[in-house]
Image (tube, grey):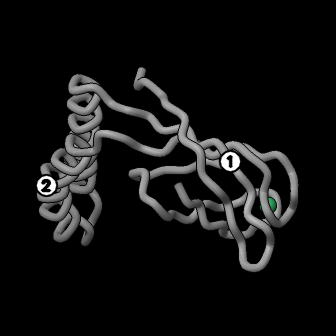
Amino acid sequence: MPSTRTLSGTLTLGADPSQPVAVDVDTFSLIERTRRAAMGLALCWSLAFASLFIPVVHFVAPPVLLLAGPIAFVVRFLTREALRQVRGVCPRCRAERVLPASGAPKPERNVFCEGCGNQLTLRL
Ligand SMILES: [Zn+2]
């Protein structure tokens, strides 16, 4: 299990007043990063093997996926932190939400509100 820490940030959308939110960020240990990287590699190479049996696709997909596997391994191994979720009030629909988030924590990132369907700007 990755350890989770909570950051504070704000959600904004256009001219609506920004709302303070809590942002949960997963921090991965060396073992977890290695496990995540190996899973990415295994997934790419499994799909490469499975695509060998699909006509026409087997000309393109296996070499691309064989190359994508090590790239996925490196990218996932170097990922030390990832956003998990954003908890707070949506500036547009004004409802308390738990919004899924992904990717590395950056100063500014887009988050999708499932309630009102708007793309919100998350600032850390
Ligand atoms: Zn909303």
User: What amino acid is at disc 2?
Assistant: Leu
From the viewer's side, name the closer residue of 57 and 77: 77
User: What amino acid is at disc 1?
Assistant: Val
Counting from the top left corner in percent of width and height, residue 121 is at 61, 67
Quadrant in which ligand 1 is drawn:
bottom right
Q: Is residue 43 left or right of residue 2?
A: left
Q: Would you name the residue on which mark 2 appears?
A: 66
Q: Is residue 38 left or right of residue 107?
A: left
Could you say whether the residue bearing mark 1 is in a helix, strand or loop? strand
User: For the point 12% across and 58% down, which residue is it?
Assistant: 67
Using the numbered discs, state the Cα–Cα distance from disc 1 to disc 2 in whole angstroms.
41 Å
User: For the point 45% across and 60% down, which residue is it?
Assistant: 107
Counting from the top left corner in percent of width and height, residue 34 is at 20, 30
Residue neighbourhood size for the residue with mark 1, other residues' Cα within 10 Å, grouped as few (<14), some (14–19), many (≥20): many
Can residue 40 be seen? yes
Q: Quadrant of residue 94?
A: bottom right
Residue neighbourhood size for the residue with mark 2, other residues' Cα within 10 Å, grouped as few (<14), some (14–19), many (≥20): some
Q: Would you name the residue on which mark 1 appears?
A: 21
Q: Residue furthest right?
A: 94
Could you say whether the residue bearing mark 2 is in a helix, strand or loop? helix
User: For the point 21% across and 41% down, which residue is it?
Assistant: 77
Instruction: Identify the image quadrant of the N terminus.
Output: top left
Can residue 46 be seen? no
* Mark number, residue 43: none
Q: Are marks 1 and 2 in contact (CB under 8 Å)?
A: no
Sequence order check, earlier mark of 1 and 2: 1
